[in-house]
Amino acid sequence: MPQIAKSAATRRERVGNAAWTAGGIILTLIKLPLWLLYFIPQQLRQHPKWSYRQAVTNELMRAFLYHSSVLQMRTSLSLEPGVEKELFVRMPPQDPRFYSGVLTDGAVQPCVIGGIWFPTVYQPGSHDERNTVLYFHGGAFVIGDGRLAVSGFAAATLAKSFDAKVLSFSYRLSSNPNCQFPAALQDAVTAYAYLLDQGVDARRIILAGDSAGCNLAITLLRYIADNNGTLLPHPVAAVLCSPWVDVFLALDPGSQQRHEKSPADYVPSNLQSWGARTYVPSHLPASDKYISPNRQPFRTKAALWICLGGLEILRDEGISFAEMMRAEGNRVEVYIEPYANHAILGVGNITGFDKEAEKAVKRAGEWVLECRS
């Protein structure tokens, strides 16, 4: 009988999700002609400097992410090559010593993860002296992956601006069972250790990410620093676009809804609150330094370049984090794209901020070069 009841509940859930999906699609299709007309006058757009495309896609992105969050859609992460073919690599867990301290969890264990090289696969023993970028995709820890369909724009932009090979990896998402923290950080360690195992010099590794991916990149830097660089060496720099550094705050959806930049930012409050609820494990508070990095600054040898959109809700959060990290003696540069919203590196090709993303990352590449010299 319990199994029958469970099956019935599952069927009801599927029917409910299907109904919501159909309703969401219908509602968006009804709104779309209204948006297409409403945003024709420049003064009616979310910002008068925005293009018509930027104004319309902002609302489409918000609608898509809102309904995805209501349904709490799960993203399946395949370990098959798919369309990427030879660019795809599987990365097994590395030395067990790398997964110590906060990464030790009885329910969450290191596992094999997948990644995509761009534009070509790194060849061990090639003594390639170009940069290597490890890219951490965004998505509030619950959606997205490192595949080219999702992360291809970011990979191409980073490869061009840094004259680099890019490894875009897929970390476990907390929307899936038993994938709460520290699963994603274990995967970040696996990807970083994989690069070192391939013979990539840490002094030529640059971490780069968007939104929640930045959170993960920052916590990897913290993990390296907390171990004094003895387990894993420090990378040279981190390029952080729209870093989400206060997961604790996201547990209150109203804080985002009340934000003055909310009308111009496509990220719905239910996306971040969904991510916060599922990512935070039962044994740690959301304010823990490994969950919300801005709650406790730290010293890192990596230079930090932080890109923020002037019209995104995480702008002030990012500036505050930069100031705290600078006060710890870190080398930090903040770049603000005044009329952009959230995560232009990751989705600028969709939201119409591709040129702004390319300009920002080009500047990041120049700055990292200055740091080296």
Image: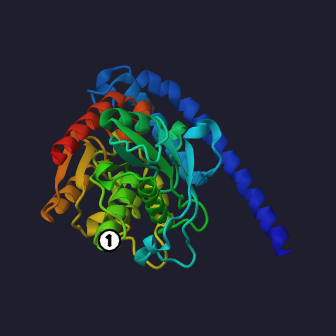
Number of numbered tags placed on the structure image: 1
Q: Residue 230 in the image: state x and y as whole percent.
A: 32, 71
Q: Label 1, on which residue?
A: 230
Q: Is residue 109 visible?
A: yes
Q: Which quadrant: the C terminus?
A: top left
Q: Which quadrant: the N terminus?
A: bottom right
Left or right placement of residue 308 versus residue 75 in this view:
left
214 lies above or below 362: below
Q: Residue 301 in the image: state x and y as whole percent.
A: 22, 61
Judge by depth and name the residue closer to the eye, 47 or 181: 181
22 lies above or below 269: above
Q: Residue 73 in the image: state x and y as whole percent.
A: 60, 52
Q: Residue at x 18, y 53 (%)?
A: 332
- Quarter-of-image position of residue 88: top right
Label 1 neighbourhood size at 10 Å, few (<14), some (14-19), many (20+)?
few
Amino acid on which disc 1 is placed: Thr
**Image color mode:** rainbow
Q: Is residue 63 visible?
A: no
Judge by depth and name the residue closer to the eye, 1 or 345: 345
195 lies above or below 56: below
Q: Residue at x 40, y 40 (%)?
A: 165
Disc 1 on helix, strand or loop? loop
- Quarter-of-image position of residue 287: bottom left
Left or right placement of residue 169 versus residue 301 in this view:
right
Q: Residue at x 23, y 63 (%)?
A: 300
